[in-house]
Image: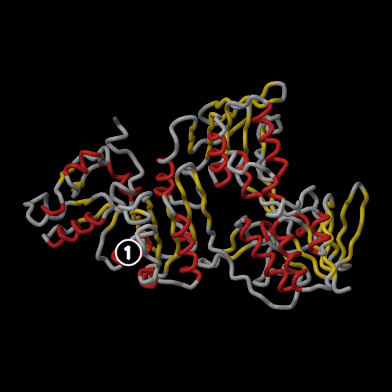
């Protein structure tokens, strides 16, 4: 018998470590202790079961061949001793043992190597009636079954989701598909607040359905109302929202109690501190998944990024390092993607908030377009926001909202992982054919526009910045679209505007004093940029083009008022 490896936690990191280790080392004794009743389930798909897209729960805990991934499966197929219902209560690092409770009996188990894959637990809100029937978290399999049963058996018509992050928004879509009147309450001023900058989140907000769905931003949940122990609503600081079902999706916290009690170092994020080999402060103990700290590859900041994809990568690295390979885990980019009703939204790298927190000087640009050539059937709108460092033009981060957003985000992951600059991104040899993209991909266009901005060739203004000053006036808004485009829709509430189609810009007379602020705009900002250059050549000194034009404008339009 080889060395004994004990793994605490039998979901993503734990079972990936165990399975990879068994493939690498046929002699190791591998024991997994999981406190819950289930092993190796795919929690990321749970909202799609609630929405009816995934027809059976077996999809999450069975192999593609239909075999349940339970203790018997791992013993027979993998040669792994995986035990459920085993709650580990203590780690003795000096004696190299763990203490756990199984069926009410306290037991001890020695280890040569210990792996902590203890995961994370949903944050609970310490509010009145938080324990009322009908108030749920949505993280574990039993949460999913309870929510599904409540909808089917309790006559639920109104649901409130607290939190507009990934889980909250995915569940909101699922509930609307189930025919429920759905309300989302979010303390911050945007959906997906950890991932998206304001103007990109507002694009998502603008695409949300108008029927059976309400979004309440910048509202704080202060209590749950209940009758006879059953939830009846959610009280915010602004309103009472009726509900027979409430989902609390305000985030999760890493399960570090065992590690902390054992004297292992806890990092600044509250996660278990690990080195580049995913070893804790005790070299005989590894940690991975949601309980372990990560390093951001761009900012070098320590981050808490609970993602199933990261947890699986951690498990592979840990297993290889147990085998002596000395594999370094390079860190994360904080990549995420989400489908919210008809809109896809994704991001990777830094956003404005995290770039500023890292002390990096940067500029950004918002660039709309189509996900493929516009004349192709199925072409959809796609808006990309790109950030790059001043001076070096190193790509720092990106966000994308619209059709095939994931494709562009994944490309940016590769680019940033290799330290790409805007010039690199502009010259990527991206596959081109009309059904897939344009001859200059959206990312290359964004890179070129941002390069122009960084080098002073373009003076762009971000949509959210223009929205902040739109009603104040003091500028001339020059819309260079055709009269038909202007008639179809325009930005609302602009005090002083004129329509000068681009082909008339060179011949137009005096528009205003040469030093007055001018903002040019078109449909996607290409003509707006060209008009900016033309007007500057005519002697106007304070000219800016509106990034994104009408296609990237997430705020009020004349059509909205009708």
Q: Is residue 327 rendered to the left or right of residue 385?
A: right
Which residue corresponds to the image point at 30% horizontal and 31% vertical from the top-left? 561
Which residue corresponds to the image point at 40% horizontal and 67% vertical from the top-left? 431
Q: In the image, residue 509 lies at what x, y percent? A: 6, 52
Residue that extends furthest to the bottom in the rendered view of this protein: 325
Q: In the image, residue 196 lies at what x, y percent? A: 46, 51
Which residue corresponds to the image point at 70% horizontal and 38% vertical from the top-left? 145
Q: What element carries label 1?
A: loop
Q: In the image, residue 11 lies at what x, y percent? A: 72, 55
- Residue 356 in sight: no
Which residue corresponds to the image point at 49% horizontal and 59% vertical from the top-left? 348
The color scheme shown is secondary structure
Q: Which of 242 and 55 is in front in this view?
A: 55
Rendered view: 108 above or below 246? below
Q: Name the residue beneath numbered marker 1.
A: 439
Q: In the image, residue 498 lies at what x, y percent? A: 15, 44
Tell me the crowding category of disc 1: few under 14, some 14 to 19, or many 20 or more residues within 10 angstroms, Cα based: some
The quarter holding residue 125 reads top right
User: Which part of the image, by quadrant, shows the N terminus?
Assistant: bottom right
Residue that extends furthest to the top in the rendered view of this protein: 228
């Amino acid at each position: 018998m080889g060395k004994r490896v004990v793994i605490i936690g039998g979901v993503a990191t734990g079972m990936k470590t165990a399975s990879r280790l068994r493939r690498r080392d046929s002699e190791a004794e591998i024991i997994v202790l999981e406190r819950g009743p289930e092993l190796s389930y795919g929690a990321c798909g749970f909202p799609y079961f609630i929405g009816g897209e995934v027809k059976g729960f077996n999809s999450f805990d069975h192999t593609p061949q239909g075999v349940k991934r339970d203790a018997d499966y791992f013993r027979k197929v993998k040669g792994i001793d995986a035990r459920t219902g085993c709650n580990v209560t203590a780690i003795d690092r000096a004696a190299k043992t763990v203490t756990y409770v199984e069926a009410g009996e306290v037991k001890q188990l020695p280890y040569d190597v210990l792996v902590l894959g203890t995961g994370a637990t949903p944050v609970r809100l310490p509010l009145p009636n938080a324990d009322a029937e009908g108030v749920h978290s949505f993280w574990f399999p039993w949460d999913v079954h309870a929510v599904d049963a409540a909808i089917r058996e309790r006559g639920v018509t109104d649901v409130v989701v607290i939190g507009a992050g990934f889980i909250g928004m995915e569940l909101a879509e699922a509930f609307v598909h189930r025919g429920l009147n759905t309300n989302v309450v979010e303390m911050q001023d945007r959906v997906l607040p950890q991932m998206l900058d304001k103007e990109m989140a507002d694009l998502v907000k603008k695409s949300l359905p108008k029927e059976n769905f309400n979004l309440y931003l910048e509202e704080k949940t202060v209590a749950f109302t209940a009758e006879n122990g059953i939830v009846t609503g959610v009280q915010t600081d602004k309103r009472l929202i009726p509900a027979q079902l409430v989902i609390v999706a305000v985030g999760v916290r890493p399960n570090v109690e065992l590690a902390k009690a054992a004297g292992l170092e806890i990092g600044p994020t509250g996660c278990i501190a690990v080195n580049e080999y995913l070893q804790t402060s005790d070299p005989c103990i590894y940690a991975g998944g949601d309980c372990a700290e990560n390093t951001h590859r761009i900012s070098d900041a320590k981050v808490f990024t609970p993602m199933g994809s990261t947890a699986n990568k951690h498990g592979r690295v840990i297993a290889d390092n147990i085998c002596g390979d000395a594999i370094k885990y390079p860190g994360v980019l904080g990549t995420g993607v989400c489908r919210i009703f008809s809109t896809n939204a994704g991001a990777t790298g830094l956003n404005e908030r995290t770039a500023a927190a890292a002390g990096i000087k940067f500029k950004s640009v918002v660039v709309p377009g189509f996900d493929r050539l516009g004349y192709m059937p199925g072409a959809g709108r796609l808006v990309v926001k790109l950030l790059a460092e001043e001076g070096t033009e190193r790509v720092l981060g990106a966000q994308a909202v619209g059709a095939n957003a994931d494709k562009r985000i994944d490309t940016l992951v590769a680019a940033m992982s290799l330290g790409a600059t805007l010039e690199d991104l502009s010259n990527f040899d991206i596959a081109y054919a009309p059904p897939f993209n344009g001859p200059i991909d959206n990312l290359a266009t964004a890179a070129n526009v941002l390069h122009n901005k960084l080098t002073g060739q373009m003076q762009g203004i971000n949509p959210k910045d223009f929205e902040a000053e739109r009603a104040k006036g003091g500028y001339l808004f020059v819309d260079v679209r055709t009269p038909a485009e202007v008639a179809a829709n325009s930005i609302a509430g602009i005090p002083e505007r004129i329509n000068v189609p681009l082909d008339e810009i060179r011949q137009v007379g005096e528009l205003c004093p040469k030093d007055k602020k001018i903002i040019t705009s078109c449909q996607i900002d290409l003509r707006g940029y060209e008009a900016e250059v033309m007007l500057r050549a005519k002697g106007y000194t304070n000219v800016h083009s509106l990034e994104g034009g009408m296609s990237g404008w997430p705020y009020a339009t004349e059509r909205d008022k009708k």
